[in-house]
Every structure is written in structure tokens, then in C-alpha cells.
Image (spheres, rainbow, N blue to C red):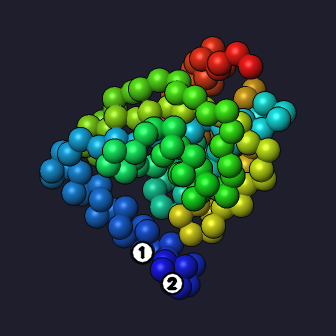
Amino acid sequence: MFHLIPAPLHRVALRYAHAARKLWWRVRRPRISGCRVLVFDPAGRILLIRHSYGRGGWMLPGGGLARGEAPVAAAARELREETGCGLADAYAVAVLVEPLWGARNTVHLVAGDTTDAPRPDGREVTTAAFFGVDDLPDDLAGVMQRHLSAWITAARAARPAR
């Protein structure tokens, strides 16, 4: 249904919705659950995205878990929705608890592979690209600047033997 809204209008609506969500989290302080996806291409590069809302830094794909949804399934769904990429050989890496605008956010780190080229929808996600793990962009989102290298190392260590 959202595809019926012109993309520029949809991006504006997402910015307002994101601001309202942050305010709601500050007031209610809910417990929320989500996932972040460390997805690698065959060359070992990692996929990063930029949202149409927020501060605009590069981030990992991901999003919220639906009630009763398994983290690996949520990661595959979010990756497909945000980038059009499939997730193969997915596995859990870690579970983190971090504050998010007053909410208590339980984040499931999931890693896996893709052979697909990213195709962001131009609405929620404006840009998606693969980066060498030793050549990450300078304008990473704050949490990515602080933790992405460690998460990549953890993902490599947790990778099941094939």
C-alpha cells in the first residue's frame, strides 16, 4: 500500500514518523527487540545502508522483530525489504542490549552471505553499497563507528564450519 505514495512524500512521512517514534520511546521507555545484519558478498565486503530518516550515517541493514519472530528470520526479512538481497547461510552472532532514545533495545546480531546486488527502494533506504572491511566509509553512524569492526570480528569467529 505504501508504494502508492510518491517516494518523496513517503520519505518526508518517514522522517516525521521517526521523530514521533523517538518521542514515544522517551516517554514510554518500552522494551523493544530488533536485529542488525552483517551480510557479506563473495569478496568478503560488508553491506551498509543509508536511511531516508535519522542522521544519514552508514548503518547495517536491520529492523524490528515481529512478535514471536525468530531473529534469523527477521534478519532475512529486513534485509530483503531494505535492499532486495537474499540472506544465505545465516547464523546468530551475539545479543546486545543498548539504549535507544529511552527504549531498552535488545539487538540480535545476525550474519550471513549474499550474492545479490543491493536495490534499495529509495523510500526507507536511499543508498546501499558493499565496502571492504578495511575500507569502511568515514561517515558511519555513531554506534557503527564504535562497534562495527568488533562485530565483524565476532561474525567471522562465530561462522559455522562449512
Q: Is residue 117 visible?
A: yes
Tell whether 161 sits left or right of 105: right
| Displayed quadrant of residue 133 | top right
Q: Secondary structure at mark 1?
A: helix
Residue 36, image x, y percentages: 51, 39
x 57%, y 46%: residue: 76
Residue 111, image x, y percentages: 60, 32
Count of numbered badges drawn on the protein: 2
Q: CA distance from mark 2 to mark 1?
A: 10 Å
Q: Is residue 141 visible?
A: no
Q: Which residue, given by chain and number where applicable, does mark 1 sit on?
A: 13
In the image, residue 26 sits, relative to residue 31, either above or below, namely below
160 or 154: which is nearer to us? Answer: 160
Tell whether 53 sits left or right of 82: left
* Quadrant for the C terminus in the image: top right
x 34%, y 44%: residue: 68
Q: Which mark is residue 5?
A: 2
What amino acid type should be assigned to the residue bearing mark 1?
Ala
In the image, residue 81 sits, relative to residue 38, either above or below, namely below
Residue 143, image x, y percentages: 47, 35
59 or 109: which is nearer to us? Answer: 109
In the image, residue 21 sits, relative to residue 66, either above or below, namely below
145 or 29: which is nearer to us? Answer: 29
The crowd level at tag 2 (other Cα within 10 Å; few <14, some 14-19, many 20+) is few
The residue furthest left is: 28
x 66%, y 43%: residue: 87
In the image, residue 20 sits, relative to residue 90, either above or below, namely below
Labels 2 & 1 near each other (Cβ < 8 A): yes
